Image (spheres, rainbow, N blue to C red):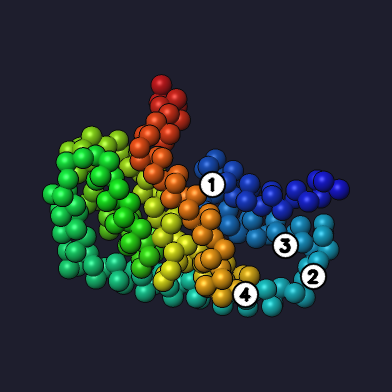
Amino acid sequence: LPLHGLLPGCIPLSIIILILSGVMTPTEAGAVASVLSFAIGSFVYKELKFSDLPGILVRVAKSTAVITGLIAAASVFGWSLTFEGIPDQIVTFMASLTESKIVFLMLIYLLVILLGMFLESISVMIVIVPLLLPVLKTFGIDPIHFGVMISLATLVGLVTPPVGPGLFIAMAIAKLQIIPLFRAILPFLFAMLVSMILIAFIPELSLWLPSVFLK
C-alpha cells in the first residue's frame, strides 16, 4: 500500500514538529523518534523483535562512541585555537583584506568551511560567531542573513573530511568506506555550495520569510 511506504517519513517529520513546536528538546525528540522507529519496525513491517534490542543497542553505542570521540577531539582543538587567539587574528586579517561585502561573505564561507573540516559544527559557531558579529555592521550585513550563511557553511563541514561527523555516522550505519561515500555525496555537496553562493548574493532568499513574520 502507498501509505505503508510513507510511514517511515513520519519519523523525521515528528522530530521537526516536536522541536519547532517547543514541546521537546532535540534530544527528547530523538528519543521519541527512536521509539516510533521501533514500533513501526515491530508492529507494521514486523522486521524487528524485542530480542533484537540488545544487538541494536550495542551497535548504537559503538556508533555513538565514534562520533563522541570525534566531537571531543574537535572541541579540544577548538579550545586550543581560541586560547591562542587564532580565530580573532584571522577575522581581523579578513576584515583588513577587503571593503567589499560580497568578498567578505565569501571569506566567511571559506573560513567556516575550513574550520568545519577539523572542528565540530557547534564548536565552529562558538568560536567564530562572537568574533564576526561586531564586523557585520561595518559591511552592512543583516544578522539573520549571516546566521543562515553560517548554518549552511557548517553543514558543509559536517560532510567534509577529515573530521566530517556526518560522514562517519553514515559510514557506521551503512558500513561503507569513507572514500566511496565521499564520492557519492559530491553532487549533493556541489548543490549545497551553489545554494550558499546564491544566498550570499541574494540576501532576500534568507530574509523574506522572517520579514513576513516580523510584520
From the top left corner, tell me how far across and down residue 56 is, in percent. 67, 73
Give 93 or 16, whichever is nearer the viewer. Answer: 93
Callout in the foreground (4, 1): 4
Amino acid at dot 1: Ile
* Picture residue at 52% right of the left edge, 66% below the top: 182
The relative height of residue 206 versus residue 46 in the rendered view (above or below) is: above
Identify the residue position indicated by label 1 in the image. 19
The relative height of residue 209 versus residue 47 in the rendered view (above or below) is: above
Identify the residue position indicated by label 4 in the image. 175
Give 6 or 79, whichever is nearer the viewer. Answer: 6
Distance between mark 4 and mark 3 Cα atoms = 21 Å
Identify the residue position indicated by label 2 in the image. 49
Identify the residue position indicated by label 3 in the image. 38
* Picture residue at 65% right of the left edge, 60% below the top: 34
Q: Which of disc 1 and disc 2 is earlier in sequence? A: 1
- State if disc 2 and disc 3 touch (CB < 8 Å): no
Q: Which of disc 2 and disc 3 is earlier in sequence? A: 3
Q: Which of disc 2 and disc 4 is earlier in sequence? A: 2
Amino acid at dot 4: Lys
Distance between mark 4 and mark 2 Cα atoms = 22 Å
Q: Secondary structure at mark 2?
A: loop
Report if residue 172 is visible in the image.
no
Q: Residues within 10 Å of mark 3 (few under 14, many from 20)?
A: some
Q: Residue furthest right?
A: 1
Q: Secondary structure at mark 4?
A: loop
* Picture residue at 63% right of the left edge, 78% below the top: 58
Q: Residue furthest left?
A: 96
Q: What is the count of numbered marks? A: 4
* Picture residue at 75% right of the left edge, 59% below the top: 39
